[in-house]
Amino acid sequence: MKKGIENFVGVPDSTLKHFVDQGLKKNKIIIATREEEAIGIATGMSLSKSPSLVFMQNAGFANSLSTITSLVEMYQIPLIFLIGWRGYLKNDAPEHAKIGAIQPKLISTLGLESKILTESNWEKSCNWAIGKIKKGTYCSLVIRREFVD
Amino acid sequence: MIRREGVEIVVKTLSTKDIAVSANGFMSRDLYEARDRVANFYMIGSMGLASSIGLGLAIKNPSRRVHVFDGDGNILMNLGSLVTIGSHGPKNLVHFVFDNSAHESTGGQPTNSVSIKINEIAKAAKYKVFTVDSKNKLEATLKKIKKINGPVFVLVKIEKGKYVSKRIEIEPTLIKARFMKAIRNR
């Protein structure tokens, strides 16, 4: 992911723990208080022609719907959303059940182009996302939570 | 002083190089009407986020001053932003909050800035804080802060007014395109 992306702004998510920890080690991460705030900060950076990614859990993605439509979509801000998909497994914690179940529909209703990252497609998908922001548009990459702790 | 007057006093002092970001609602309309500039980013949706966009711009444009035109209702929706800005300490960020203790864009309903002082919250978040309640004091403070490193917070006490500035007639994608062009040399 490092090639082509200069800023990583978001709210930590346990599904994305290793990603966030690596970024923190390299001093590349800005942690915001809420997901909408992270999108705002990343927007300021993208407007400065500095390619940015926003990371969040899908609960925070659901919090951000109005910001995504009235800022990112309306102004066409180049951004990558990296979203941890809680509630992907049926036996995940109960607070994730509803948003987890409607996650794919939520993304498609927004018209947000998206790819689910897997062991075999992650590199290609990341390059696809970087290509999107280079063209001045936005997209999302989703990481499924495939374990229960 | 009403918001439109305060906004005009501030925006008159901006140089070509200076960046401005304005909150949604009447704030952006006031900025547009008072002085439309290509380096103004009118945030007409995404309520509460003007200061966050300002932080991203300030970090990436260290040689430019970033001026956030915020309202009390707007910043109260995103108080976490004060903490994030204060902890990053951008020297080039100036955050104006025009405070009439009301959501004027939606009909003048009260905000809780009547009893909880936003300037004191900003102080706790390590901003350099100034509070003004007249045009003269605002003008004097603007001169003073030119030489001060940010993040600077200026609480501008205003009265509610009946005056409503015109709507922004520029398409959002055009607001963005001309803004990006104006600031492309970081």
Image (tube, coloured by chain):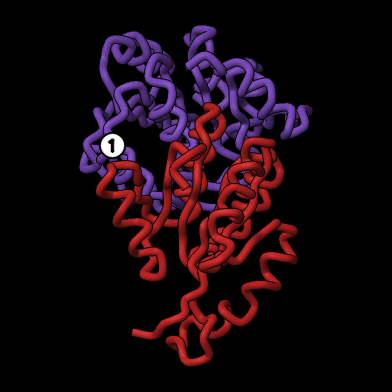
Chain colours: A red, B purple
Residue B67 quadrant: top left
Q: Residue at x 21, y 42 (%)?
A: B124
Q: Chain of mark 1?
A: B
Seen from this angle, which residue lies furthest front?
A120
* Residue that appears at 59% across and 43% down: A130
Q: Looking at this view, is A60 or B41 the one in front?
A: A60
Camera-side residue of B95 and A122: A122
Measuring 66% from the left and 29% from the top, which residue is drawn there?
Answer: B176
Judged left or right of residue A74, residue B47 is: left
Local crowd size for mark 1, using a 10 Å CA cut-off: few (<14), some (14–19), many (≥20): some
**In the rendered image, is residue B71 in sight?**
no
Q: Which residue is label 1 attached to?
A: B88
Amino acid bearing label 1 = His
Residue B22 horizontal/vertical position (percent):
55, 31
Left or right of A9 in this view: B32: right
Q: How many marks?
A: 1
* Residue B3 versus residue B149 in the image, above or below: below
Residue situated in front as seen by the camera: A127 or B63:
A127
Locate residue A18 relative to residue A34 in the image: left or right. Answer: left
What is the secondary structure assignment of the residue under circle 1? Answer: helix
User: Horizontally, is A72 left or right of B127 in the view?
Assistant: right
Q: Residue at x 58, y 33 (%)?
A: B27
Above or below B151: residue A124 = below
